[in-house]
Amino acid sequence: MTLTARRSIAFGVAPAVLAVGAVAGCNNGAPSVQAPPVTAASTAQSTSTGTDPGVPTVAPTDTAPTDTAPTDTASTDDQGVPTMSSAPSSATGDPAKVCTKDPDSFSTPAVLAPSTKKTTWGKSLELSQKYSGAVTLTAEKPVAKKPASDDFFAPKDQVYLLIKVTAKYKSGDSTFLGSSFFTLRDTQQNACDRDVLGDVVPQRERFSSVTIKKGMSAYVGTLVFEVPPGQDYSHYTLMYLTDSFDTKDAAASIAWTK
């Protein structure tokens, strides 16, 4: 190879080497951007939240549910199961159509039982008391009567219900009877209040406390109750409890209804 050819090759290679070195020098001097390191915490977060590592996420807070006060209305859950029941009322049925028992009454109201002797209005039933005698009692069909305008003790939004009762001696020793031993129940089995102060019936004509004994004439008195107006009172039930203080067994001895 001639000297001239060698020089031409040398001068052609040198610029190429210099160009490569310049490019390498620029790459070494410029700052580089690196991906953030992957740590165990970021890997766990990525797994639990389903996001890529390095992307910030908002973790849910573990707050306990707050308690809410119950309401008085019944509600149901998704399964249709009641979640709350309302408190029972003092009377069953529409208040405008049923009786309500006086909460201040001290007597034990009678209830129907399998042992109760029952009959219809106007018929007689025999009542026998232990260690005493026997009498027959007859209760006439109930009669409703509106209170007079000047009746100071008239029941509010109610009417009087009058039931005439006749007691006759039958046998044995004397038998004590009392008006408080009678209980009147409506068709929903609510006990009706007994009136003692109204003017609808004079006090001398009311059924009061009496002792029936041999040789005594029939005793007739009227029971007075307070009932809602406009009802079929023939379907009400009048019961007699032998002892009004018998709190263990309030089963009526006898009863009348339609």
Image (cartoon, rainbow, N blue to C red):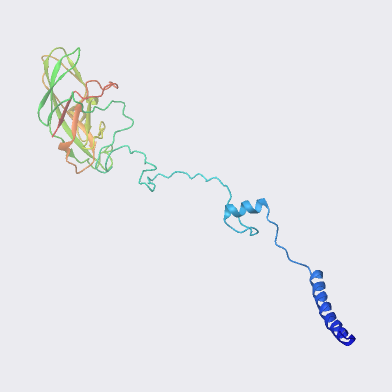
**Does the rendering let one see residue 206?**
no
On the picture, is 61 further left or further right than 69?
A: right
Asked which quadrant contains residue 84, the reply is top left
24 sits left or right of 74 in the view: right
In the rendered image, residue 52, in percent from the top left (x then y), is placed at 61, 59
Q: Is residue 225 positioned above or below 124 on the image? A: below
Residue 243 in view = yes
Q: Residue furthest front?
A: 1
Residue 94 position, x and y percent, is 27, 43
- Total of numbered circles in the picture? 0
Residue occupying the point 28% across, 36% down: 100
Q: What residue sits 16% from the left and 40% below the top?
A: 232
Q: Which residue sits at x=24%, y=36%?
A: 226
Query: Relative to the observer, which residue lies in front, 163 or 12?
Result: 12
In this rendering, position of residue 170 left or right of residue 228:
left
Q: From this viewpoint, which residue is outermost toward the bottom?
A: 4
Q: Position of residue 249 (x, y in %)?
A: 26, 22
Query: Which quadrant does the C terminus fall into?
Result: top left
Q: Quadrant of the N terminus?
A: bottom right
**Snapshot quadrant of residue 144:** top left
Give whichever of 140, 10 is nearer the camera. Answer: 10
Q: x and y percent of residue 32 in the render? A: 76, 67
Residue 62 left/right relative to 167: right
Residue 174, above or below 152: above
Vertical position of residue 4 compared to residue 99: above or below = below
